Amino acid sequence: MSEETLTESMRNTLERRRQRSGLRSLTIAGDNSTDFSSNDFLSLRSSSLLRAAYMERLRGDFDLGSGGSRLLDGNSKFAEQLETDITAFHRAPAGLLFNSGFDANSGLYASVPQSGDIVIYDEYIHASVHEGMRLSRAATRVSFSHNSVASLRSTLESMKRGNSSIASGKSNVFVGLESVYSMDGDVAPLVDIVRCVDELLPNKNGYVIVDEAHATGVIGARGAGLVCELGLENRVFARVHTFGKALSCNGAIVLCSEITKQYLINYARPLIYSTFMSYPALAAIRSSYELLWTGLAENRRSRLWKLVQHFDSRLEQLDVLTDVHGAALLQMPPRPGKSSIFSLLTPYPRELARYCQDAGFVVRAIVPPTVPKGAERVRVCLHADNSTSEIDLLVQCIGRWMDDVKAGGKTPAARKQSRL
Ligand SMILES: Cc1ncc(COP(=O)(O)O)c(C=O)c1O
């Protein structure tokens, strides 16, 4: 294919995506907008405390680059100590740092399931897990309905019926889930999931893997995560904590047994074939984690939880209007467990998001393929440095949008559509 033909082909593909309203593009939030979108749950990216601790670590002499993959020249005593301390904080036997959560999940899922094994995963699991599963030798990969223990149970039962090596314990079953889901903000029923896996796989060939990306720094004592909160450290096979969200850095750690760690060092390709994090990146992670384990981030966590309560109660008071077809303009799905992520389901996610953005609030429309058709929403994330009055103004803005839609009969996009 000539470059011209390739360019044409890519242009056509992008155009088709644009026509389906699914085109992605890079944007930068306005300087004076209020952040209700980022994953900076503890507002650490603008914290002077964190900045000062980080700058202090950058004084003195250090190599700027890591020099290579961790297996070659990229490792350091600083990295090893950081890994040990983070592992201890989350009460795990061993831990292995990765450059990102994407690398951690894809490396873990691609390498650990052996041929003939099975991976059962929550249907809303993150793309990085799909990436790993795609590359893995597992014989079967099958989803269960989101956060449904009944669906997990029936999936496990049918797998056992169809595959005698599962029932006999010869094949392993990996169960992949997140503690807090990034799009719905709901929390996994982890106790029941672990109980179900233990009960249906009495030969101990069930292995639960929990992605704690959105729980890290937020949930559990001092932000150690959901597994620690529930005391399930010895009942899960592996945990992935990422540093790019509440901790405001980059990178991740896989918490696991010592032998799994050694296995990942030998077989996880994103670890083996990528330059390891540099000292400045590791120093940022250490500075951020220190706020958690010394308790200095506790006031931020408690502010965040108060805001979650406040937003919850304001949303409950909101008068939900309907469009000309009688469809609710807004729906708040039930949110088992609490988190700082809210999803406002609406048939008009782009219009609502744009309305809020024009009023100075950064919120994002989430549309297919990120969420299934019919589950379009505006995602709202709260942060420790948001204020109750900012939340009140956002809720008023949402209320005004519903009034406007009701008064106009249709959303602007729907009106434009009907003129075509
Ligand atoms: C649930 C979940 N897991 C893993 C990742 C990937 O983490 P990272 O951003 O560190 O690559 C993300 C981030 O988008 C996530 O939301």
Image: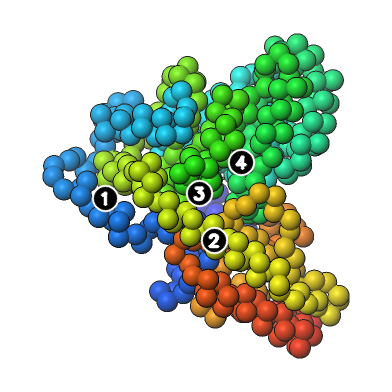
Judging depth in this view, the residue of 383 and 99 nearest the camera is: 383
Farthest left residue in view = 60
Per the image, the residue denoted by label 3 is 218
CA gap, disc 2 and disc 4? 24 Å
Q: Secondary structure at mark 3?
A: loop
Pick the quarter of the image with the C terminus: bottom right
User: Few, some or many C-alpha atoms within 10 Å of disc 4 (few <14, some 14-19, many ≥20)?
Assistant: many
Q: How far is mark 1 from mark 2, CA to CA? A: 28 Å
Which residue shows up at 73% across the image and 44% down it?
146
Instruction: Write the residue at 76% across / 34% down.
Output: 152
Question: Is the residue marked 2 within 8 Å of ligand 1, measured from its CB?
Answer: no
Q: In percent of the image, x 67 and y 16: which residue is there?
A: 204
Which of the 4 image quadrants contains residue 414? bottom right
* SS at mark 1 in the image: helix
Q: Earlier in the sequence, mark 3 or mark 2?
A: 3
Left or right of 53, for residue 149: right
Label 1: few (<14), some (14–19) or many (≥20) C-alpha neighbours in 10 Å: some
Secondary-structure class at tag 2: helix
Give how far across and how far down residue 136 sits, in percent.
Answer: 60, 27
How far separated are the C-alphas under marks 4 and 1?
30 Å
**Of residues 163 and 91, the one drawn nearer to the viewer in this rendering:** 91
Q: Nearer the viewer, mark 3 or mark 4?
A: 3
Report if the CB atoms under discs 3 and 4 are less than 8 Å apart. Answer: no
Disc 4 residue lies near ligand 1 with CB under 8 A: yes
Q: Which mark is residue 54?
A: 1
What residue type is disc 1 on? Tyr
As measured in the structure, the alpha-carbon distance from the residue carrying label 3 to the one carrying label 2 is 13 Å
2 or 4: tag closer to the N-terminus: 4
Q: Earlier in the sequence, mark 1 or mark 2?
A: 1
Mark in front: 2 vs 4: 2
Q: Amino acid at mark 2?
A: Lys
Q: Which mark is residue 178?
A: 4
